[in-house]
Image (spheres, rainbow, N blue to C red):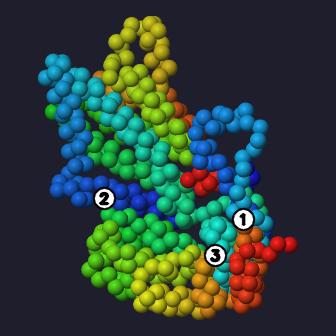
Amino acid sequence: MSHARAEALSDGADSFWLEGVGVRFGRNLVQARSLRHAAAGFFRTSGIEWYEALSGVDLRVHRGEHVGIIGRNGAGKSTLLRVMARVIIPQQGCVRVDAAARVVPLLELGIGFQPDLSGYENCHLAGALLGYSRREIEDRVPGIAAFSELGPFLHEPVRTYSSGMYARLAFALATDVEPDVLLVDEVFGVGDEFFMARCAERIRRLMSAGATTVFVSHDLEFLLARCGRLVWLDAGRVVADGEPEAVAERYRACAGRAPVR
Amino acid sequence: MLMDPRSRRFTRLYAWSQIKLKYRYTYLGFLWNFLEPGLYLLVLSAVFSFVNRMNVGDYAVFLFSGLVPWRYFEKTVNVCMDSLVQGDWLLKKLPVSVFALPLARWIVATVEFAFAFVAVALVLLALKPGWSVHCLVLPVSFLPWALLGLGLGLLTASLFTFFRDLRPIVQLGLLLLFFTAPILFHADLFPAGSWHARLLAFHPFTYFAALFQKPLHAGRWPSSIDWAVSFSVALAALAAGAGALRASRRRLYFYL
C-alpha cells in the first residue's frame, strides 16, 4: 500500500495545501484481523474491496481563512479533517501543512481526559497533547477555571462531572490557547444554550485574531454566519468550493447529493 | 527521531498519571507498590517451606532472583501488546506518535519493577544472611531485561493491531520460554554434555536469568558470555520492535 507525501509548508501564505488526496478503507478489514485470513490471502485471487473515503481531493486553505465543510453523512468530511490534522496519512496525493503553525484539532471534546484524574490534572495531560508545556498550562489554569466555571470541582475526578461540566472544561482547555489553526468537527452540540453562546463568542474571537479555522458541520446557518468559504463534499469528492451562499444554495437544491454528470 | 517533543511530554505525563492512579482510591495507596510484590514472594516462600517442606532459604533466593525480572518482562510484553488497540481513543483523534502508548506502559511497568525490587530486597535480606558486593551489578543486569521487554512489547503491539490472534500465541510462547528457562530449576541439574544441558545453552533466558541469579544467589559476577548474549538479544529485539512499529505506523489507523 503506497502512502501520500507529507510535506511542510513554508510559503507563509497557506495553512494547508492538499493535492489529489485519496483515503480508502478496506471493506473486509473486520475479517482481516486474523492470522487465518492473512494465510488464506495467499490463495485468494480476488483483491480486497475498498471504500473510497476521499478521492482526488484538492484543497488549498490560506492563512487566516475560515472554511466550512458540508456534506451528507459519510461524505468524507471527518476523514478530510483528520487528514488535515495529520491523524490519517492518506494513501494517495500530497499533504502540505504550515510548518510553523500550531494546529489544534477539536475533533472531539475531552480527548486524552482520564476519568479518574482531576480536572486540573487532566488540563496538564490533555494540554501536553495540544503541545503546551507545564508552565504554559499552569499560566492558563485560572482562565480555564473561569471559563469552565468549575470552581472547586476542578480538583475533583472528571468521572464525577456532569456532561455539561465535562464539555465546559474540555472546550475551555482546547480554546484557551492561541491556535494558528483550529479544526473543529461538530463539537458544539453539547451544553446549555448559554454555554454554546459563550463557545461561539470565543470561536469568533479566535477567528478575528487571525486563526485559520476549518469547521465540519451540518449546521449550514452556523457556517454561513462564520465562514468565508464553503466546501461541499460528497462520496469523498469535492463537489463545490467557493462563496458560501452560492455553495449552500446548490447544496440545498441537490439535497446534499452531487449532481449526476 | 521516533517521537516529537509533544508526544514525549505526553508519554511522560500519561505514564506518571497511570502510576498515580493505580492505587489512588485504595486505603493503603502508595504502600501497595511495595506490599503487593512483597506479599507475593512471602506467600511463595510459605508454600515452599510448609507445603513442599523444602530448604526455603537457598531455593527461594534462587527462584526469586530469576522470577522477579521474568515477571517484569512478561508483564511488559503483555501490557505493551494491546496498548495500540486500546489506545484508539487517542490515536484516531490526535496526531500522536505511535510509540507514545507502548512506551508509557513500559515506563509504568519499569517503575513498578523498581518498587517491587525494593520489596524483594527486603524479603531476600530476611531469607539469606550475608550479601556480597556482586549485588551492585544488579542495576546493569536489569538493562537487558528492560530493553528486551520494550523491544518485544513494541513488536507485539505493532503485530497485534493487524493480527488479533496473536495474544494467545504470545502468551503460550512466554509460558514455554518460562518453563524451559533455568528459572524454576538450576541449569546444573543436568550433567554437562547431556542434550538438556546443550539445549539450555541455546536458550536466551539462560543468560538473562544468570544476570540476576549469579550476583544474588551464587555470589559471583555474571560471565562475559552472559552479558554478550543478553545485550545482543535485547538490542536485536529493540531494533526489530522499533523498526516494525515505525514501518507500520501509516497503516495502523485503518486497523484500529
Q: Amino acid at mark 2?
A: Lys
Q: What separation in Å lies between label 2 and label 1 (alpha carbons)?
A: 42 Å
Q: Which residue is mark 2?
A: B20
Q: Is there one chain holding both mark 1 and mark 3?
A: yes
Residue B28 makes an appearance in the image? yes
**Residue at mark 2: chain:** B
Residue in the picture at 13% in, 23% down: B50
Q: Which mark is residue A54?
A: 1
Q: Decide if residue A137 is on the left or right side of residue A68.
A: left
Q: How many callouts does the rendering have?
A: 3
Identify which residue, A94 or A55, lies in the foreground. Answer: A55
In the picture shown, does residue B75 fall above or below A12? above
Q: Amino acid at mark 1?
A: Leu
Near mark 1 (Cα within 10 A), the count class, few <14, some 14-19 or many ≥20, is many
**Residue at mark 3: chain:** A
In the picture shown, does residue A118 fall above or below B59? below
Q: Secondary structure at mark 3?
A: loop
Residue in the picture at 32% in, 31% down: B67
Residue in the picture at 32% in, 47% down: B112
Q: Amino acid at mark 3?
A: Ala
Front disc: 1 or 3: 1
The C terminus of chain A: image quadrant = bottom right
Q: Secondary structure at mark 1?
A: strand
In x, y percent, where is residue B151? 51, 41
In x, y percent, where is residue A168? 40, 80
Q: Decide if residue A94 is on the left or right side of residue B192.
A: right
In the picture shown, does residue B122 fall above or below A24? above
Front disc: 2 or 1: 1
* Residue B117, picture quadrant: top left
Q: Are marks 1 and 3 in contact (CB under 8 Å)?
A: no
Q: Which residue is mark 3?
A: A100
